[in-house]
Amino acid sequence: MERHYLELDRLWQTVQRQTSGDGDEEWRVGIQNQRRDLLKKIRVLGGNKAADSAVQKQHKVRTTYENPQPSTTPSLGSAQVMPSSETVKQPLGHLTKAILDPVSQDVDNILVSYNLTASAALENAKIAHELILDPEIHLKIDPTREKLTDSFLEHVKHDTRLVMQKLYAEMCTVIPPSNPMRKFLDTEFDTQWIESQHENHVLDVPSKLRLVLRVIRSVCAPMRDEAVDKLVEQVDSVDVLRDIFVLVRQLQADVLNYQLDTVVRPWLRKHAVAYEQEKMAHMLESQDVELTTAWMQNAAIRVHAEQPLLPRGDFAKQVFREALLDLCFAPTAVGVQNVPITLALDQARIQELQNEIQVLLSTGVLCALVKGACKMNDTEYLAITPKILACLQSNDVTMDRVVEAVVEVSGKHSMDQLVRKTLSKDSLAYRAMENGLRKLIIAQLGKKDYLNSQFKAELTQLSLSVVHTNICSLVGRIDRLSEFNWQVHVQWYAKINRFIFN
């Protein structure tokens, strides 16, 4: 709890320095309220001495805030933070995600951990980047924490007082002192009161648990109501304690996701470009332009040949878009060793886009193949799409399984060789569809409207209307990546284009 208090102070200092006080009023008020609530909790649980100690540590740590320090949040645990000066010195040939951002290789684990703090999201470039580009991303419960709960309950199962103390401490993380229900918790779970009840053999655990569930019911999201009601019915069960702890963990995730949506994301949306420019500035300055132009060179030559009269600013942006699509449509996965430095935080995202493009193209060309071979009507044509798409999206997909799926939906065993030929590198049908999709995507970037009738008509011409919704989502994600990356690195990309044509 003391660590969380210091984290909030670090966050306040970081926001203040990065925004110079401009537009951060909501942040400052929210953080101040959280710090005040935490200090009260520390005083309740540890007394005035513990609260004074936290304040003293705050003053001591503030002397290190001349430059914001990396987060020491336990949820970032396994990765050791590397000073930015060490990062800058890394040569391009050895650049990896882990070097660029020491915690980035553990981001997937961090994003399922319920106790990611707002300051961790702000201070970690990779997490902030994901929050900007993926509006759907949210924290989830780490399944391993259920095992820790089981272990704790097994260890203290004969000491009801410890269980009550732990439950109270967990509840305090989701019920702030300002909430009217908090006083009921504070009273019923007062340490001396619990001790007195225990000594006099009148400690009514089921009654305490009903109180906890009543408090949870008053503050939880509607989607949790059913789970709460079930636990109320099972309150006399020996297993109910574990389930209540799990429910409180879910509430913690709900609260943190609410903070991400209402505090972190709004701040990032307002300051995202400047924030990431600052994070990347020193690294880009340390790179040799010549070493980072190869991925854009072919695109620059193509754009110059096809549109020689484009204004310089439009030319540089079109070159960047074409180069980005070169990566997305590349036949082999973009790895950490060949990802451009300006897209190093997006290497995994580009791989996902590569995979999705191949899946959607394969679905389109196979559905068209089956429709033609079986003379299907439009209804039958649409009916086979989900089965083929699901096969191609599965983690263990192989050519043999794709053939089996096509044979199943077509009823023709003679399709085996035709399917293999259609998906081969030399397939004219696949290449024609790929080129058509690429041209369609490049034409849509920056338009923000992928659901109009003309777009769908063009997909129909390409035999891709069966995956229209998926392609709209794909174009949206490519467009978000393209626009944001361009805004962050526009000066760098202009510099690269000047270098190419000098």
Image (tube, rainbow, N blue to C red):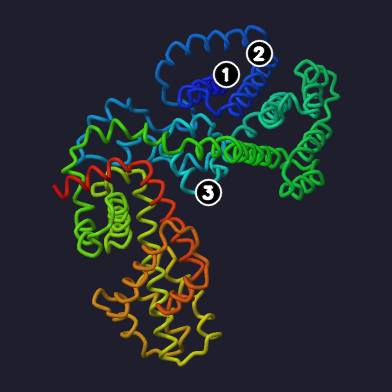
Q: Residue furthest bottom?
A: 375
Q: Position of residue 116 (x, y in %)?
A: 53, 34
**Residue at horizontal 27 percent and vertical 45 percent from the top:** 493
Please rate how many residues cluster around mark 2, counting C-alpha atoms within 10 Å: few if below 14, some from 14 to 19, many from 20. few
Please rate how many residues cluster around mark 3, counting C-alpha atoms within 10 Å: few if below 14, some from 14 to 19, many from 20. few
Lower sequence index among marks 3 and 2: 2
Task: Say what secondary structure mark 3 lies in.
Answer: loop
Lower sequence index among marks 1 and 2: 1
Amino acid at the residue labelled 1: Glu
Provide the residue designation for mark 2.
46
Lower sequence index among marks 1 and 3: 1
Provide the residue designation for mark 1.
2
**Residue at horizontal 55 percent and vertical 8 percent from the top:** 56
Q: Is residue 496 above or below residue 448?
A: above
Q: Is residue 148 above or below residue 86?
A: below
Task: Say what secondary structure mark 2 lies in.
Answer: helix
Q: Position of residue 397 (x, y in %)?
A: 39, 68
Q: Is residue 56 above or below residue 30?
A: above
Amino acid at the residue labelled 3: Pro
257 lies left or right of 127: right
Provide the residue designation for mark 3.
135
**Residue at horizontal 46 percent and vertical 42 percent from the top:** 109
Q: Quadrant of residue 321?
A: bottom left
The quadrant of the image that shows the N terminus is top right
